[in-house]
Amino acid sequence: MVRFARVLSYAVIGLLAVAARVQAQAAPVLDTSRFYAEFTGGANFGHTSSGTLGAEGGYRIKGPWQVFFEAGHMFTVGSSDLDARAQTIGNAVGATTSASYKISYYDGGVRYNPQILFRNMFEPYLELGFGGATVTAQTTFAVNGTVVPPESLGVQLGEDLSGTVGKGFIMFGGGATYAFATRYFADGSLRYGHVLARTSVIENDTGINTLRLQFGVGIRFK
């Protein structure tokens, strides 16, 4: 988590530095639109890397402050805890294991877009959101290189290794948009997400860290 936060901080600082440089070179352009909507896609990094797809929309409250809502899906997410749980059973039955999560998430919160400071086509922003995630665990067992159903090994998997559980979700991220063709914009961002543990359903459950590098294309309107 500390490494993810450090990378995110460096990225945000870099975006602000670039925006300041562009500020000195470009004529001021103030975004006065009230709404925006976009589709996003990118990569999810962490214990396991994969792709991610999503969508986001927002509404300007006043000045640089907006509220937003996003939702999406991370195709493959892993954790050391999940691997350890699967491997414990695999060792007991003489099988190799492969375990991962599929996560559908949603969150909403506040977005700070310092357009008053950076009045140009390139606009940085920070976001903080709270929501939920549907986490589906998938675990496979293989014997001599052949995947076999866990039942054939006398194994009955719990929800920690094979099941779908709803959990809380927190997101913090930063990025920048670049306006083009009057109403449209491109968006690039780095977003750290933490899926909260739910020990009431899974014994000794632990949180799941995610890091999304995503890009989007959207539209602004009044």
Image (tube, helix red, strand yellow):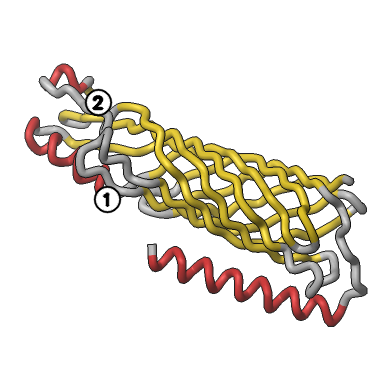
Looking at the image, residue 71 lies above or below residue 43: above
Q: Secondary structure at mark 1?
A: helix
From the viewer's perspective, tell me whether residue 58 is left or right of residue 148.
right
How many angstroms separate mark 1 from mark 2 (CA)?
22 Å
Image quadrant assignment for residue 203: top left
Left or right: where does residue 65 sit relative to residue 222?
left
Of residue 80 and residue 192, the one placed in the foreground of this image is: 192
Looking at marks 1 and 2 on the same chain, the residue that comes earlier in the sequence is marked by 1
**Amino acid on which disc 2 is placed:** Val
Quadrant of image for the N terminus? bottom left
Give the residue at x 56% y 51%.
Answer: 129
Which residue is labeled 1 in the image?
A: 80
Residue occupied by mark 2: 147
Mark 1 near mark 2, Cβ–Cβ under 8 Å?
no
Q: Residue visible at 33% across and 45% down? A: 197
**Front in this rendered view, residue 214 or 201:** 201
* Residue 26 percent coordinates (x, y): 88, 75
The answer to whether 190 is drawn above or below residue 197 in the figure is: below
Secondary structure under badge 2? strand
